[in-house]
Structure formats: C-alpha cells, structure tokens
Image (cartoon, rainbow, N blue to C red):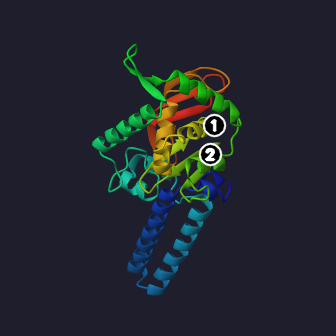
Amino acid sequence: MRLRQPEYTGENRCYPCTAVNVVLSVFFAVVLASALYLLTASFVVASLTGTVFLFLALTSVWLRGYLVPGTPTLTKRYMPEKVLALFGKADAGRATGAGARTEDETEAEAKQVETFLTEAGAVEFSEDIDDLVLTQEFEREWNDEIRRVDENPDADEVLAEIGFDPDDERIERYDGAVAVRDWDAEFTRWPSPTALRVDMAGARLLSRHPDWDGYTPEERATVLRSLRIFLEDCPDCGDIDVSHDTVESCCSVRQVVVLTCSETGDRLMEQEV
C-alpha cells in the first residue's frame, strides 16, 4: 500500500476533507488520552500516547489526504454548503451566507447581461422563436474572430484579456479547465480550451462597447459565459449538443446542463440546474 496518495494531496488536496480529518484526529487523540488516564491514572502515559497518536494521525492526513477511509464520499453527502463555502468549494448558485445571491439578484444580473448584449448589437429578439438570438453581423464577426484565436489559447492571456490578474490566487487550473472562485462559490469556469478560445474572441468584440471598461472582470466573465449560450456551431467543426450530466468534485455532486462540441467532445459550458 502506498503511503502517499497524489490524487488527494498536493494540488489535488481537498481542504474541507483535510480540515475534517484534522478535527477528527484531535478528537480521537483526546478520547484516547482520556480513556487511558481513566484506566491507568497516569497522566504521563495518557498524554504521551495521545500525542503519539495525534502525530501519526496528522502524518496520515498529510501523506494520504485523510485519516478516516471514505472521507471524500462523506464530505460530499454531509458537509454543509456554508462550510464548503469557507474553502471556496460550494457549488455556484448554492452557496449560503453573506455571499449568496437571492433569486431577485440573479434575475437582475440576467437582465443586465441581456441589456448589455442587446445594446452591444450581439443579440436581438426573434419573433420566430420568441427568444433572443445572435444578430447576423455579430455572429459573422464572432466566428471570424474565433478563427483568429489559437486553437489552444494560453489561459493567462485569456484571463488578462477579460481583466483578471493571471497570478490571482483565486484562479484554479486543472485538467485543461480554468476556474475563478470567490469565497462563496465558483463564479465562472472555462471547462475546455475551446471555451477559452470562444471567450477570448467574444471579449475582443465586446470591448468596443463603451460600458465594457466599467465592468469588473467578474461581470465581464458573466457576460461572456452568457454569450456562449448563443453559439450555434463549434469553432471549425461540428454542432453543439445539449445534455444533462452529473459533475462530481472532491466535495460535491451536482446536476448540470452541458453544451458540448459534437465532433471534439470539448465542453463549452456547464450550467447547474
């Protein structure tokens, strides 16, 4: 049996799981020391045994990511969203506490995005489908701009284009995806290089709008994520498939609607339902 488990340590370490196991280690050490003191009436024996146990337990957490087997599964099932939020692991839209958004705030944000995209000439209302669609001019310009972006764009360049500092500690990179988190939830995510490529092109076009400079990087990312929904074809090839999926992380399981390029399998967006 390997002492170190890289899937749960280093960059892959789950800090909510680690915190739970540290607390459990201290608890078990205190219980063990107390029980021995009652049995032996020796404070030295009890405290020494408890200290040794605590050292071994914390070493296990450091090397393996957890002490109690099955901790990742237990965390997914029972860890409150408010606690996960303290570690930036709460699911988008489900965080609780001061940073959680109300339904009215979510609707107001959607309305703001819709207004911005309409004023920017990106979308318009279609009576044929009774919904918003890309304008023909913007769709043509967007597709042209997408083709100018490298197929595997540098994530730092895309983040900088949107206005993020690539060295921001909130930025997470894993398995070809990039995410930016706040203290309460993941507020935007690029699940593939294709999603980065699409948003790079979108940012270059939307930067022509006079209000763009007044938007924060987070607000720009929200606009670009919403714009992705209107893309009808994947860059260079294939249609866009819409499906439902279960996304599993170290700490949670959530149901999402997924936009996927049919030819490459690259995900353009995951929206929780």
Left or right of 149 in this view: 243:
left
Helix, strand or loop at label 1? It is helix
Q: Residues within 10 Å of mark 1 (few under 14, many from 20)?
A: many
Rendered location of residue 221, percent (x, y):
50, 44
Q: Is residue 203 visible?
A: yes
> From the viewer's perspective, is residue 265 above or below residue 9?
above
Foreground residue among 116 and 271: 116
Q: Amino acid at mark 2?
A: Val
Foreground residue among 157 and 253: 157
Question: Which residue, given by chain and number where applicable, does mark 1 sit on?
Answer: 197
Quadrant containing the N terminus is: bottom right
Residue at the location (60% across, 28% down)? 141
Foreground residue among 248 and 41: 248
> From the viewer's perspective, is residue 37 above or below residue 187?
below
Left or right of 231 in this view: 82:
left
> From the viewer's perspective, is residue 176 above or below residue 129?
below
Residue at the location (41% across, 46% down)? 77
Question: Which residue, given by chain and number where applicable, does mark 2 sit on?
Answer: 158
Whether label 2 touches label 1, CB < 8 Å: yes
Residue at the location (54% across, 27% down)? 138
Quadrant containing the C terminus is: top left
Helix, strand or loop at label 2? It is helix
Left or right of 5 in this view: 132:
left
Rendered location of residue 114, percent (x, y):
40, 34
> From the viewer's perspective, is residue 43 above or below residue 245?
below
Left or right of 221 in this view: 34:
left
| Mark number displayed over residue 140 | none
Q: Amino acid at mark 1?
A: Arg
